[in-house]
Image (cartoon, rainbow, N blue to C red):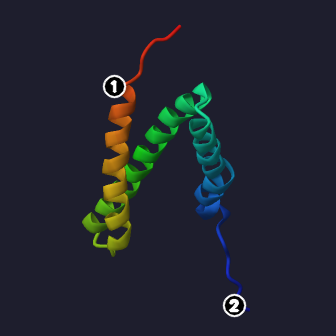
């Protein structure tokens, strides 16, 4: 019998992204579009999440090359520019924070 065994832990990050991160992006976009303060709060957290995601994917590919494994260059061509762009917007976000009480 040739049964394919799927390790559930391999897919946990995809499940996490689909049920938590993607809806959080949608809620943030809606709140930012409606100019609600909650959107500003969520935007900072999600920018940091996205920067850390791009860094982890880039470092993962760097470690693959150090261990003589195939580097997925398509991932790098997407996530390095996205990481730099999101890092730029994260810096802008924190520079423009004000204390309005």
* Residue position marked by numbered label 1 in the rendering: 95
- Along the line of sight, the residue nearer the viewer: 70 or 45: 45
User: Dot 1: within a 10 Å radius of its alpha carbon, few (fewer than 14), some, or many (20 or more) residues?
Assistant: few
Q: Position of residue 66 (x, y in %)?
A: 25, 64
Q: Position of residue 60 (x, y in %)?
A: 37, 59
Q: Residue at x 62, y 63 (%)?
A: 11
Q: Position of residue 63 (x, y in %)?
A: 31, 60
| Number of the front mark, 1 or 2 | 1
Closer to the N terminus: mark 1 or mark 2?
2
- Along the line of sight, the residue nearer the viewer: 38 or 23: 38
Q: Position of residue 24 (x, y in %)?
A: 63, 44
Q: Residue at x 44, y 38 (%)?
A: 48
Inter-mark Cα distance, 1 to 2? 57 Å
Q: Find residue 89 and report its image quarter.
A: top left
- Along the line of sight, the residue nearer the viewer: 45 or 43: 43
Looking at the rendered structure, the secondary structure element under dot 2 is loop
Task: For residue 71, say whether it is visible.
Answer: no
* Residue position marked by numbered label 2 in the rendering: 2
Q: Residue lying farthest front?
A: 34
């Amino acid at each position: 019998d040739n049964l394919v065994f799927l390790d559930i832990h391999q897919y946990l990050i995809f499940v996490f992204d689909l049920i938590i991160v993607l809806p959080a992006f949608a809620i943030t976009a809606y709140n930012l579009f409606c100019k609600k303060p909650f959107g500003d709060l969520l935007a900072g957290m999600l920018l940091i999440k996205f920067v850390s995601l791009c860094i982890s994917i880039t470092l993962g590919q760097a470690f693959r090359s150090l261990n003589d494994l195939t580097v997925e260059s398509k991932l790098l061509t997407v996530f390095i520019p996205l990481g730099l762009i999101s890092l730029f917007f994260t810096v802008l976000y924190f520079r423009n924070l004000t204390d309005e009480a």
